[in-house]
Image (cartoon, helix red, strand yellow):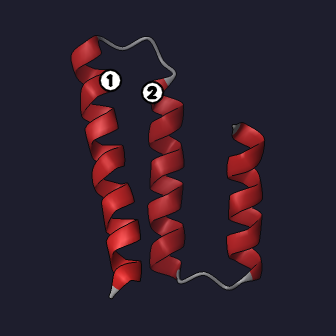
Amino acid sequence: MKDNVIDLIRRLDQKQAPEQDMTLIREILELLNEFRNNYPAVTKKAILFRIDQLTDELILDKEF
């Protein structure tokens, strides 16, 4: 999975992705790294919720 994420970032960089998209992707990646830590379930749920919000923002911007 890590290789797929790195490949996605490379492809986005090559296509000159908007800076806002890159910012969202970086924040999602940082949250995924945080998720690996040994946090209580409620904290992990909050991290996943934020990832979901950021993903929606990234996707919904593309539909219009």
Report whether 51 appears left or right of 42.
Answer: right
- In the rendering, which numbered label is found on residue 4? none
Q: Nearer the viewer, residue 14 or 19?
A: 14
Hey, which quadrant is residue 60 in on the image? bottom left
Q: Amino acid at mark 2?
A: Phe
Where does residue 12 sit, x and y in percent of width and height?
Answer: 68, 73
Above or below 33: residue 41: above
Task: Say which residue appears at 48% left-offset and 67% top-offset.
Answer: 23
Marker count (numbered): 2
SS class of the residue under badge 1? helix
Where does residue 57 sit, x and y in percent of width and height?
Answer: 32, 66
Task: Say which residue appears at 36% left-offset and 14% top-offset.
Answer: 39
**Quarter of the image where the N terminus is located:** top right
Above or below 18: residue 24: above
Report whether 19 appears left or right of 17.
Answer: left
Q: Nearer the viewer, residue 41 or 62?
A: 62
Task: Say which residue appears at 54% left-offset and 33% top-offset.
Answer: 33
Pointer 1 local density, CA inside 10 Å: few below 14, some 14–19, many at least 20: some
**Lower sequence index among marks 1 and 2:** 2
- In the rendering, which numbered label is found on residue 44? 1
Residue at the spot of label 2? 35
Circle 1/circle 2 CB separation < 8 Å = yes
- Spatial CA distance of label 1 from label 2 is 6 Å
SS class of the residue under badge 2? helix
Hey, which quadrant is residue 3 in on the image? top right
**Quarter of the image where the C terminus is located:** bottom left
Task: Say which residue appears at 48% left-offset and 18% top-offset.
Answer: 37
Hey, which quadrant is residue 40 in on the image? top left
Which residue is most to the front?
A: 63
Q: Amino acid at mark 1?
A: Lys
